[in-house]
C-alpha cells in the first residue's frame, strides 16, 4: 500500500511531470503519507487491505489524495531468515541520540563523513520514499534515482514468529506496528552481504524514536532522535565501497524474504554493553 497527497506548492510542476511521463502514479512533486506491505496467506488479504486503508486515512501526516494497493502472487518460495536482536538505548535528548548513533556506526565500520552525509539526507525538506545508498567510507550516494531512493519490498513474517515477536516486544512495552514492521524490514536489509548498517529516522511527526541496525549489533532503538512534530526523516543503507548496485537493488526490491525465527529482545541496554557485545 502506498498513500500520497498532492503537493499544492508544486502543482504546476506536478501537472507538467505527469503529462511528460505518466498518466498516473506518484511523482517527485507528491507528498508521501503512508506505506506498508507484507507477505500474507490468501485468506488474510481482505483483512489486511482494510487495515492498510484505515492506516492511510488516519495517518498523522494527513489524509491522502491517493491510496494505491497492489497484490502480487509469489512465484518463488521466500528466503527464510531470523530477525535481528532488539535493544533500546537510553538516549534522553536529540544531541545524546545523535552521539550514540555516531558511536555505534563508527564501531560498525562507517566513516564519520558517511554518517554526516546520512544526516544531511534526513534533514532535507523533501523526504525520500525509499532509502538512500551511501558508501561506508567515501560517503558517496550511489542509488540511481535520487528522488525515489531504493524501496525494500517482498518481506514478511510467519504467524508463529509474529506471535513470538509480539510477546517479546510486549514485555518491553513496545509492541506496536511501527516497531514490528521496522524490525522485519531491518532484518531483511541486514541479511544482504552488501549492507554494513542502516540508519532510520521516521518521518512520522508523532514518532521520535529512530534506529541503527546491523548484523554486528542488531536492531538498536534510539529514542529522541528528532524533535516531536518534525516531518523530516529518512532511511540510509551504508554499503561496501565495491557494492554491485544492481545486484543489491534486485535483492532489496524483488527477492522475497520471510522471518521464521525471532532473536532476543533485551530491553534498555547501556551503550558500552552494546559496543562490547561484539568486541570480546
Image: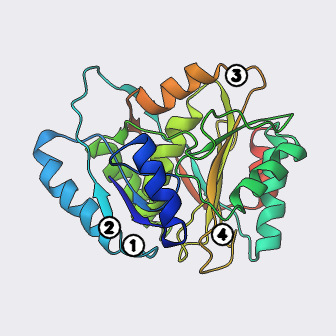
Instruction: Using the rendered view, name the quadrant where residue 234 is placed.
Output: bottom right
The residue that mark 4 highlights is 223
Is the residue under label 2 in contact with that under label 4 (CB below 8 Å)? Answer: no
Separation of residues labelled 3 and 1 (CA atoms): 36 Å
Would you say residue 220 is visible in this rendering?
no
Q: Residue furthest left?
A: 43
The residue that mark 2 highlights is 55
Instruction: Give the mark nearer the N terminus: 4 vs 1.
Output: 1
Of the two numbered discs 4 and 1 in the rendering, the one whose residue sits closer to the viewer: 1
| Disc 3 secondary structure class | loop
| Disc 1 secondary structure class | loop
Separation of residues labelled 4 and 2 (CA atoms): 23 Å
Q: Assess disc 4: are there few (<14), some (14-19) or many (≥20) residues with their C-alpha within 10 Å of its C-alpha.
A: many
Which residue is at 60% across, 38% downward?
145
Question: What numbered label is drawn on residue 128?
Answer: none
The residue that mark 1 highlights is 59
Q: Locate residue 120, reporting x and y percent.
A: 78, 56
Separation of residues labelled 1 and 2 (CA atoms): 6 Å
The answer to which of 69 and 178 lies nearer the viewer is 69
Question: What numbered label is drawn on residue 243?
Answer: 3
Instruction: Give the mark nearer the N terminus: 2 vs 3.
Output: 2
Q: Is residue 131 left or right of residue 68?
A: right
Q: Is residue 98 left or right of residue 79?
A: right
Which residue is at 50% across, 32% downward?
252
Separation of residues labelled 2 and 3 (CA atoms): 36 Å
Would you say residue 65 is visible in this rendering?
yes
Q: Assess disc 3: are there few (<14), some (14-19) or many (≥20) residues with their C-alpha within 10 Å of its C-alpha.
A: some
Of the two numbered discs 4 and 3 in the rendering, the one whose residue sits closer to the viewer: 3
Is the residue under label 2 in contact with that under label 1 (CB below 8 Å)? Answer: yes
Q: Locate residue 249, reporting x and y percent.
A: 54, 28
Amino acid at each position: 500500500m502506498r498513500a500520497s497527497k498532492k503537493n499544492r506548492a508544486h502543482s504546476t510542476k506536478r501537472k507538467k511531470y505527469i503529462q511528460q511521463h505518466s498518466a498516473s502514479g506518484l511523482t517527485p512533486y507528491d507528498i508521501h503519507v503512508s506505506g506498508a506491505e507484507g507477505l500474507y496467506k490468501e485468506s488474510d488479504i481482505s483483512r489486511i487491505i482494510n487495515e492498510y486503508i484505515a492506516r492511510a486515512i488516519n495517518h498523522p501526516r494527513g489524509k491522502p489524495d491517493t491510496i494505491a494497493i497492489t497484490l502480487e502472487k509469489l512465484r518463488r518460495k521466500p528466503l527464510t531468515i531470523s530477525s535481528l536482536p532488539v535493544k533500546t538505548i537510553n538516549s534522553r535528548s536529540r544531541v545524546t541520540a545523535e552521539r550514540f548513533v555516531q558511536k555505534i556506526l563508527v564501531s560498525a565500520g562507517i566513516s564519520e563523513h558517511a554518517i554526516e552525509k546520512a544526516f544531511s539526507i534526513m534533514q532535507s525538506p523533501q523526504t525520500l520514499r525509499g532509502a538512500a545508498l551511501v558508501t561506508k567510507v567515501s560517503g558517496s550516494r550511489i542509488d540511481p534515482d535520487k528522488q525515489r531512493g531504493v524501496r525494500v519490498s517482498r518481506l514478511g513474517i510467519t504467524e508463529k514468529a509474529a506471535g513470538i515477536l509480539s510477546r517479546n516486544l510486549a514485555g518491553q512495552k513496545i509492541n506496536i506496528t511501527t516497531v514490528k514492521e521496522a524490525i522485519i524490514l531491518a532484518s531483511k536489509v541486514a541479511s544482504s552481504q552488501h549492507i554494513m548498517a542502516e540508519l532510520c529516522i521516521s518521518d512520522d511527526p508523532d514518532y521520535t524514536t529512530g534506529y541503527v541496525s546491523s548484523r554486528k549489533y542488531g536492531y538498536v532503538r534510539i529514542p529522541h532522535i528528532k524533535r516531536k512534530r518534525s516531518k523530516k526523516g529518512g532511511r540510509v543503507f551504508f554499503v561496501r565501497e565495491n557494492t554491485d548496485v544492481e545486484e543489491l537493488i534486485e535483492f532489496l526490491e524483488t527477492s522475497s524474504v520471510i522471518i521464521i525465527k525471532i532473536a532476543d529482545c533485551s530491553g534498555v541496554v547501556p551503550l558500552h554493553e552494546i559496543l562490547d557485545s561484539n568486541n570480546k
